[in-house]
Image (cartoon, rainbow, N blue to C red):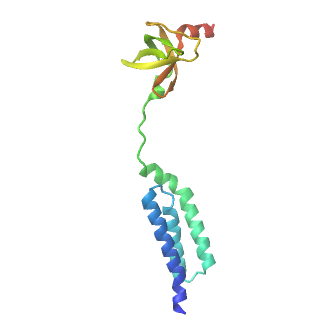
Amino acid sequence: MALFRFVPILFWLCLMILFLVIEAVTVGLATIWFAAGALTAIIASALGVGFLGQMVLFFVVSFLLLFFTRPIAVKYLSPHKVRTNYEDVIDKTVKITEGVDNIGGTGKALLNGQEWTVRTYTDTYLLEKGDLAKVKAVEGVKLILVPLDALESEKQ
């Protein structure tokens, strides 16, 4: 009869180990909280709480930890993203070094001493070497430009 007392503890222990193994394999900070919930259920089982109470404790503790501590843990444990600063080039003026023709697939410009592949915002804009344009967007490694004279005519 005493053996049946340990069945819930073994169940929760196996579940906790399973969650820890999954967490170790995925490193996603998702199942670690359920392992903590299983540990709570083990303690509750050892204290004589019924199986239904253990399940309630498991789910309550797991979801509380998941929703309230996971964002904090992710913020401090995940590697920080390297910012590329591509947003900083938007609205900068560039000088065309090779004629820009979207249909022909040509175009280069200088920005901060670096040469970029460029395209115009619409296929109707053509830019010649020496023209100035503003960066409106970045798509991959290409700058999307609008000629300065087109911007000035829009303002008028």
Tell me if residue 79 comes above or below residue 70 in the rendering: above
Residue nearest the observer in this picture, 61 or 126: 126
**Left or right side of 12 for 51:** right
The residue nearer to you, when weighing 11 against 71, is 11
Q: Residue at x 55, y 64 (%)?
A: 62
Query: Exactly how many numbered labels are in the figure?
Result: 0
Residue found at x 50% / y 9%: 127
Q: Compare residues 119 and 105 and report the one nearer the observer.
A: 105
What is the residue that sits farthest to the front in this orientation?
A: 104
Give the residue at the far left of this rendering: 113
Residue 64 x/y as whole percent: 57, 61
* Extreme residue in the bottom direction: 1
Q: In which quarter of the image is the N terminus?
A: bottom right
Q: Can residue 112 be seen in this view?
A: no
Task: Name the residue: 45% across, 65% down.
Answer: 20
Q: Is residue 155 above or below residue 82?
A: above
Q: Residue at x 52, y 75 (%)?
A: 12
Q: Percent position (x, y) of residue 110?
A: 40, 15
x then y, percent, for residue 38: 52, 71
Q: Position of residue 14 (x, y in %)?
A: 49, 74
Quarter holding the C terminus is top right
Give the answer, above or below, for where 152 lies relative to 68.
above
Q: In this view, does 42 lie above or below 111?
A: below
Work out whether residue 6 can be spotted. Answer: yes
